[in-house]
Image (cartoon, rainbow, N blue to C red):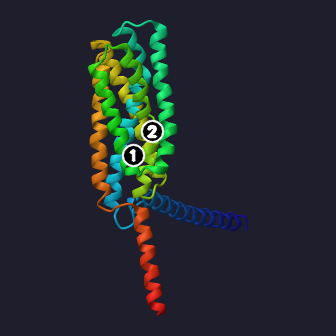
Amino acid sequence: MAINLVVGMVFVIYFWIGKSSSRYAERSTEEEDKASQKLKEILNCNSCSPGHPWYAGIIFCLLFVWFYIAVGGQMVFANYLYSYARDLMCLTKDVAADIQSMFWVGFTAGRFAGFIFAVCIPMKILIFIEAGGNLISSLVLYFNSTNTNVVWAFACISGFFIGPLYPTGISWANRYITLTGVAYTITLVGGGMAGVSFTVAIGWFFQHNGPKPMLYFVIGYSALACALAISMHLVARTRGDKFEREDHTSEMNKAVGKESEL
């Protein structure tokens, strides 16, 4: 009797454990499938531009480089303008600090002005104005690198054109694709990589070649920003503004509706 009871209990426990394990395995498989499906949906560029995933993918790549440049230019001025004024121009600590402050004044003013200009200037034009302004101010700084008055003025002007680059990139992208969490992640990753790589690179050159390479970095990033603005415009014009497409589709639907009523 006792043996039968023990054997029966063993079978019951074995059956219960086996059934629980089977349910757990099925649940784990379903959860993995759901997680995999969600990840595919998140990484699917088609959600940003339905029917044209490659278009959205190219826009994402261009955005990554744009934000990399935008933050990189900011890091160059923010970290090395003071040392440039002190070591190359031989200015006093107070004057060098004032020049650094002028950059941040221009940066703040430019970022604020960008929100105002975005209301009255099309984004595809505004992005060229900012990139072109960066290139011109960088060239002026390069050819007048030891002129205190020019450095004073164009440190502020450079900051004014660097400031709105980041928000303009987001606004520009929103005109052509639907921005998702992945798109915003790309902006953060691009900016974060710029903060690390630009700081390390120019720090190495600063240590081995002095402050002069800062000007080469400034010209290089501003020239790349202009080239990138042109590339972004050429890619975006293949499909056009998404809001204009939506308005056109809405008008076509209204026209079809009126014809059907007649």
Give 210 or 4, whichever is nearer the viewer: 210
From the viewer's side, name the closer residue of 222 and 21. Answer: 222
Q: Secondary structure at mark 1?
A: helix
Pointers 1 and 2 in contact (C-beta within 8 Å)? yes
- In space, the residues marked 1 and 2 are separated at their CA atoms by 10 Å
Q: Which mark is residue 134?
A: none
- In this rendering, position of residue 2 left or right of residue 222: right
Q: Position of residue 251 (x, y in %)?
A: 44, 75
**Sequence-earlier tag: 1 or 2:** 1
Q: Quadrant of residue 210?
A: top left
Which residue type does callout 1 highlight?
A: Leu
* Amino acid type, callout 2: Pro
Q: Answer whether residue 139 is visible to the viewer in this image.
A: yes
Instruction: Name the residue rendered at 51%, 44% in the picture.
Output: 116
Asked which quadrant contains residue 84, the reply is top left
Q: Is residue 43 visible?
A: no
| Image position of 45 (left or right of 230) | right
Q: Quadrant of the N terminus?
A: bottom right
Count of all numbered marks drawn on residues in the image = 2
The 10 Å Cα crowd at callout 1, few under 14, some 14 to 19, many 20 or more, is some
Residue 137: percent from left, percent from top: 34, 29
Q: Secondary structure at mark 2?
A: loop
Which residue lies at the image location 28% right of the left edge and 28% below the top edge?
Answer: 219
Q: Residue at x 72, y 64 (%)?
A: 2
Q: Vertically, is 191 above or below 232? A: above
Q: Which residue is mark 1?
A: 126
Residue that carries the numbered disc 2 in the rendered image: 164
